[in-house]
Amino acid sequence: MKIAVADLQSLVEQVLARHGVASARAPLLAATIVAAERDGSRSHGLQRLAGYVSSLSSGWVDGAAEPVVHEAGPGLLKVDARNGFAQVALAEAAPRLRAMADRQGSAIMTTADGHHFAALWPDIEPLAVDGYIALTMVNTRASMVVWQGTHKVLGTNPMAFACPRRSRPPVVWDQASSVMSQGDVLLASAARRPLPEGVGVDGDGQATTDPDAVLRDGALVPFGGVKGGSLAFMIEVLATLGGARFGFEDRSATIPGAVTSNAGQFLLLIDPRRFGDSFLDRIEQLIEQLREAGTGRLPGDLRYERRRIAERDGLELSPEMHDYLLTASIA
Ligand code: NDP
């Protein structure tokens, strides 16, 4: 069946509010899930909703948490998400972060004690639409083996970067440090589809294409081998600057029903206008060169196209998901 994006948003809001997300915050959180589904980022779309509900019901995450934003120095915001969702913490901090970047040219936010269970691009795309360059990173529960290690210490630590353009949607890339995100492994498991070679290892550290073996007691591997491991390490350091837990310190595995990671987020905001007036022209020159070199799709382009179609035609929803949404919005 098809559902209009606005109707899906309303259903997801109801599900989240029914399970303990403060009603003032449910629209924001629902928007990140619906935006991922709408733009085709399915690894972090509707399939994640049951995980949010489970974490909320288990008491592992506090849907009513009120974040505290503290100015830790010039251009530095330290945010305590108070065991709530990271998106809520960012929404609380964003006006001050923007004001700092307007005043000083750049600003950094670090969030601790927050749960980020979504794609990262929704956090930064709006900032680039308003002319800022934005870079964000999140650490997650230990789920990768890196640097010849034999067990998991670092997470699939994602990173996203957004660059404004003149009169065009920004270029936004958003990727995990692993060859494949855990969300895509979950999708493969649900579809009983083997993983491509080189994505993960089983509990004995042997390469496997079985998604369930990876999820059970195995691990993912970083993209680009050692280099992806290095990026994941950097993200672990930056995302925990404000006192967040390392991925290996996450206790979710010991709490029945806990699915989300309690970890950290780092966000760097730059106002390129501070460096002169030529920035947007230079970016267009760069993209023109890429076009001449054969680049068709820029990161973000496919999402924007899927968004346009979804806003026009609605989204495909399986009968099972529709039933789940209806049931979970009242029970
Ligand atoms: P993908 O491999 O699907 O995509 C990575 C990036 O590459 C995207 O920006 C994508 O753009 C771009 N891209 C892909 N193919 C092309 C192409 N042919 N030409 C140009 N650009 C291309 O991402 P991942 O699987 O690594 O990550 C998926 C999601 O998982 C991310 O949103 C990430 O934030 C999220 N994640 C979240 C975690 C969390 O704890 N919150 C943990 C780990 C991952 P486009 O978007 O346009 O397709």
Image (spheres, rainbow, N blue to C red):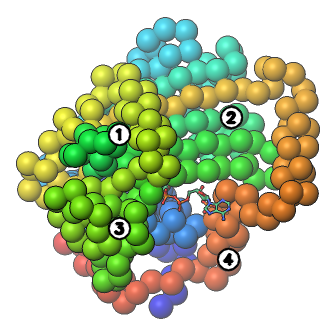
Amino acid bearing label 1: Trp
State the separation of the CA atoms marked 1 and 4: 42 Å
Tell me which corner region of the image, top left, top right, bottom left or bottom right, holds residue 238: top left
Q: How many marks?
A: 4
Please name whichever residue, 278 or 131, is drawn nearer the observer in this view of the structure: 278
Amino acid bearing label 3: Val
Q: Are marks 2 and 4 in contact (CB under 8 Å)?
A: no
Q: Residue at x 84, y 62 (%)?
A: 294
Amino acid bearing label 2: Ile
State the separation of the CA atoms marked 3 and 1: 22 Å
Amino acid bearing label 4: Ile
Tell me the mark number nearer the camera, choosing from 2 and 4.
2
User: Residue 233: x and y, percent?
Assistant: 39, 33
Mark 3, residue position: 185
Q: Earlier in the sequence, mark 3 or mark 2?
A: 2
Q: Are marks 3 and 4 in contact (CB under 8 Å)?
A: no
Label 1 sits on a secondary structure element that is loop
Mark 2, residue position: 133
Mark 4, residue position: 309
Mark 1, residue position: 147
Label 2 sits on a secondary structure element that is strand
The residue carrying pointer 4 sits among few (fewer than 14), some (14 to 19) or many (20 or more) residues within 10 Å by Cα, namely: some
Tell me which corner region of the image, top left, top right, bottom left or bottom right, holds residue 6: bottom right
Q: Is residue 234 left or right of residue 203?
A: right
Label 3 sits on a secondary structure element that is helix
Tell me the mark number nearer the camera, choosing from 1 and 4.
1
Q: Is residue 148 left or right of residue 87?
A: left
Q: Residue at x 80, y 45 (%)?
A: 165
**Can you see residue 216?**
yes
Which corner quadrant holds the C terminus?
bottom left
**Can you see residue 284?**
no
Tell me the mark number nearer the camera, choosing from 2 and 1.
1
